[in-house]
Image: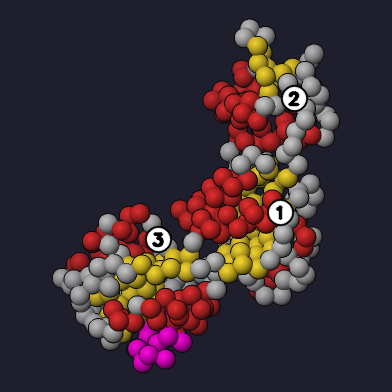
Amino acid sequence: MNSSVIYPYIVLDEQSATPKYQQLANSIIDAVRQGHIKKDQVLPSLSELSFDFEISRDTAARGYKYLKELGVLGSVPGKGYFICNDDVNQSLRVFLLFNKLSTHKKIIYDSIATCLNHQAAIDFYIYDNDFSFFKKLVSSKKDGYTHYVIIPHFIEGGENAHEIINTIDKEKLILLDKLPPKVTGKFGAVFENFEKDIFDALSQSLPQLSKYRTLKIIFPSYSYFPHEILKGFRSFCDKYAFEGKVVNWIADEPISSNEAYINLMEDDLVVLIEKIINSKLQVGKDVGVISYNETPLKRIILNGITTISTDFTMMGQKAAEMILTNHREHFEVPFHLTIRSSL
């Protein structure tokens, strides 16, 4: 049987963040599930796939290995690869759309993929906080998916995000991380309560913060961070009589004793620590530091950086659970404070 007949069903999207080997496997699974590729159909060799689709031989091999693990693909030494089972149970197809691929977003992705455990095909896209690209991706991917899992964070244009999101079938929609206003209907959501989370975390750290006179939050003016964070910060400062300041550019901010800093971005944390050290001040004694989002490195730097962080693994697990059970709810992910030497 001619192996090239499967070529029309293999779709490799250059805009997708899904690895090419996974796209290759997903395309073949989808074609088998829809009956376009039958049992005993011969598949192209690794060399043919590599040449015809301009992918590495290793990518082709990983795609075939994945199909073998699912029990879809068989092989005979000297004869090649063929479909050995057309009873494909992978009926779930997920459109996963993230604003960026940071360490923490990767934790969410890995958690979703692990929990789904080959029970769904995932097409993964990143829109780099760009509303226009977000709109283009959502508009062009309106068909063929059982679930749409979206993280809606934007630098500009986010006030109109609900108009695009509301075009998606709400029975298929799961929003992650942020719950934007004006999204209507009954849909799934696994989110952070940004205003409440920072207020509660700072309240829990009040015994350590009490030795500082001024609290400063490093909040870049050109960023995707929700402004609800600033509301929670200001509410805390007002309630507990701290002098509060929003710092948009840490590189130009003078560092003084009796200040505590709340940092959101990893790059800003590096600049902040360098400035404190160059000022001959001691972290955790003269200047306090609280950083958003737990990472292994923050457990070690300067004997430990205090962090406030949501449970990103749980966020992914709850999203996967909603996909598998087709259940819709709004779940607020817990926020954790970890006190270390930097405070």
Label 1 Cα neighbours within 10 Å, binned few <14 / some 14-19 / many ≥20? few
Label 3 Cα neighbours within 10 Å, binned few <14 / some 14-19 / many ≥20? many
- CA separation, marks 2 and 1? 26 Å
Q: Amino acid at mark 3?
A: Glu
Q: Callout 2: helix, strand or loop?
A: loop
Q: Is residue 238 left or right of residue 340?
A: right
Q: Callout 1: helix, strand or loop?
A: helix
3 or 1: mark nearer the eye: 1
Q: Which residue is mark 2?
A: 85
Q: Which residue is mark 3?
A: 294
Q: Which residue is mark 1?
A: 325
2 or 1: mark nearer the eye: 1
Image coordinates of residue 241 in percent, x first then y, are 36, 92
**Which residue lies at the image location 38% right of the left edge and 57% below the top edge?**
295
Residues rendered magenta in the picture: 235-246
Q: 9 and 236: which one is in front? A: 236
